[in-house]
Image (tube, rainbow, N blue to C red):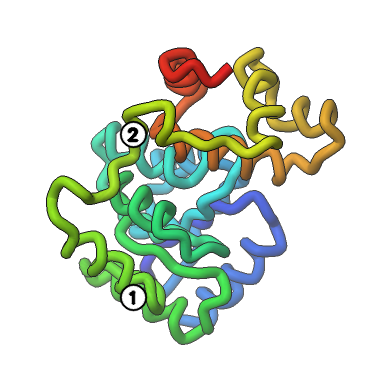
Amino acid sequence: MPTKILLADDHALVRDGIRRLLEDDADLEVVGEANDGEEMLQLIRDVKPDLAIVDIRMPKLNGIDAVRKLRRDGDPTPCLMLSMHDSEEYVLQSIDAGAFGYLLKDASREEFLRAVHTIVGGDRYFSGDLSNILIRQLTKPEGSRNTPVATAQEDVVLTRRERQILPIILQGATNQEIADQLELSRRTVETHRFNMMKKLGVSNSSELNRRVRELGLL
């Protein structure tokens, strides 16, 4: 039986390209496609794939939070994160959430398939130089390793745009509503929201609200 794979990315063209790449391999079959993190979680419950390939930045629920929720729900489905960024924080947060690998979107066809087969085979896979990030992190003294939670206000530095967007988020506005109000793209707002949550070490809007008030950022 071929390996069943689910694709989670909010860009149909990206999913189409990945699907064609995967289905050139007779051992792989795409059994579902999700547009956002919430749809991904539902599809995983429905089709029970052997592997989920997950874009980090998606609407409704980003990839890292979707994988984290999957693990909290006790679902062991291996997840391979996809990103345009080789950010140390993204890599470490992905691992902390329970991802089995992290692959850059500019990876070659050969590396993409190698990553898929490696994870399906029970191992983990990290693209290119990302292994150096893990080595640096693991060789740090215990007390100096990265933690996702900010402990003091001086640890958190928000950009001008983030400070503009933050109070609108706390009012309960959606990414699209914020984008319309500030004349930005939805993707730009999603990126700023994700970066702020990452800086503050939170995973949802209620935690963000609480953390902002604890640190007096408004």
- Residue position for label 2: 149
Q: Tell which circle, 2 or 1, labels the residue nearer the N-terminal end.
A: 1
114 displayed left or right of 179 = left
Give above or below for 16 relative to 216.
below
| 165 or 185, nearer to the observer | 165
Hey, what amino acid is under mark 1? His
Q: Using the rendered view, name the quadrant where residue 147 is placed.
A: top left
CB contact under 8 Å: marks 2 and 1? no
Residue 140 % position (x, y): 18, 59
* Residue drawn where x is 46% and y is 39% of the image: 198
Hey, what amino acid is under mark 2? Val
Residue 38 makes an appearance in the image: no
12 displayed left or right of 36 = right
Residue 136 % position (x, y): 25, 66
Label 2 to label 1: alpha-carbon separation: 34 Å
Considering the numbered disc 1 on the image, is that residue within a helix, a strand or a loop?
helix
| 19 or 137, nearer to the observer | 137
Residue 91 % position (x, y): 38, 57
Check residue 117 in the rendering and tell me which mark sits there, or answer none: 1
Residue 111 % position (x, y): 44, 82
User: Which corner quadrant holds the N terminus?
Assistant: bottom left
182 displayed left or right of 41 = right
